Amino acid sequence: MAAKETAIVTLTITEAAYGLAADGTFDADAPAVAADLRTLSAAASGGTGVPGTPLGRLVLALAGRRDSGAGPIAVVSCDNLSANGDVARRAIMGLASGWGPGLAEWISANVSFVSTSVDRITPRTTDADIEEVAEQCGYRDSSPVVAEPFRNWVLSGDFPAGRPRWEESGAVVVADIEPYENRKLWLLNGSHSILAYAGQLRGHGTVAEALADPACRKAVEDFWDEAANHLQAAGLDIPAYRQALLERFGNARIAHRLAQIAADATTKLRMRAVPVMTAERASGRSGAGAALMLAAWIDYVAATGDFQDPLASGIHEANALEGSGRVQALLRLVSADVAGDPGVVSLVHGLCGSFTATTAVSATPTRL
């Protein structure tokens, strides 16, 4: 990154790696972030430690770019976050303050933060995938990427050092990315979360299996109906996108494991369920479709103690409670505003148990 020829750095580090608090702001007190801040502060005095998080290492690299005089650069977040470029900016600026005001000022003047919506299903690579590539291609690739045929990449922001002509290969460059972000976060990722929790409770292992279950399919369609109420921008073509999602989810050759999608729920749900719930209730409707997503997650974490989440300790503490108190404590880990609304707590509590477990849930911690 200190080389002048480097014009862009992209981030694909999952939602939880940005160190967001429950309200979506940068959390300087998160253990990994606090450790990075100490390392960066020491580096300002000649220390040689390396930050432990991706964003901490990026801040260290940006300091090296500043010192080399290499000039401006674009940071492009490709993660499933609303306004992911702005989120990356807040996180990086927060960490840069550990270096001192000089670095933060240089980043503000020389680094652009580009927001994107990346829409393509790419399941975790398996040993069988590696063997198939070796058989079909005649060479061994330790990290092949399995992907569906569909692809959509939308970008919005400045590239002060230039960029490739990605639009010639189908990328879409727009002034306002929010409608595209919401379409993907709510319709694709939101329904993935429903299928991850409801599907595992009903004994399914993949997205295709869960979608074939009428109970799971109805929950997805009901949530889509709610989300569609707030996806009215021109060019989104929501009916066609929904139909395409059904075909994409039903593609059994893409063995997208529900346990993979289920990881990091507290971070994901505050971007997938909460905005739709809030918008629906502000419009005078119940938000039951979004509430069912939250209820399925609450039942899921009661059925298995083996899950990956940045707030896992809080989930275990909340699970020790009973009744609506447990529901409220779990909701508070996702959104303080949602947990503070008695109507929402009651609605979610009433929807718990909607998906009858037909087999024990066993979730292997993985990352999406």
Image (cartoon, rainbow, N blue to C red):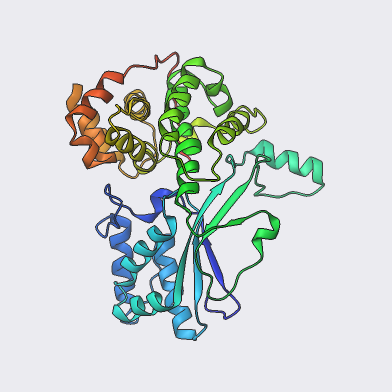
Q: Quadrant of residue 211?
A: top right
Look at 34% across and 63% down and name the residue there: 90
Look at 30% across and 62% down and name the residue there: 35
Image position of 201 with respect to 84: above or below: above
Give x and y (percent) for residue 365.
Answer: 45, 38
Tell whether 84 sits left or right of 349: right
**Count of numbered marks:** 0
Q: Quadrant of residue 240?
A: top right
Look at 42% across and 38% down and name the residue there: 263
Image position of 175 with respect to 126: above or below: below
Look at 63% across and 45% down and name the residue there: 151
Note whether residue 180 is visible: yes
Tell whether 317 sits left or right of 178: left
Note whether residue 320 is visible: no
Give x and y (percent) for residue 150.
Answer: 65, 41
Give x and y (percent) for residue 213.
Answer: 52, 17
Image position of 1 with respect to 367: above or below: below
Give x and y (percent) for residue 311.
Answer: 30, 42
Residue furthest to the front in view is: 234
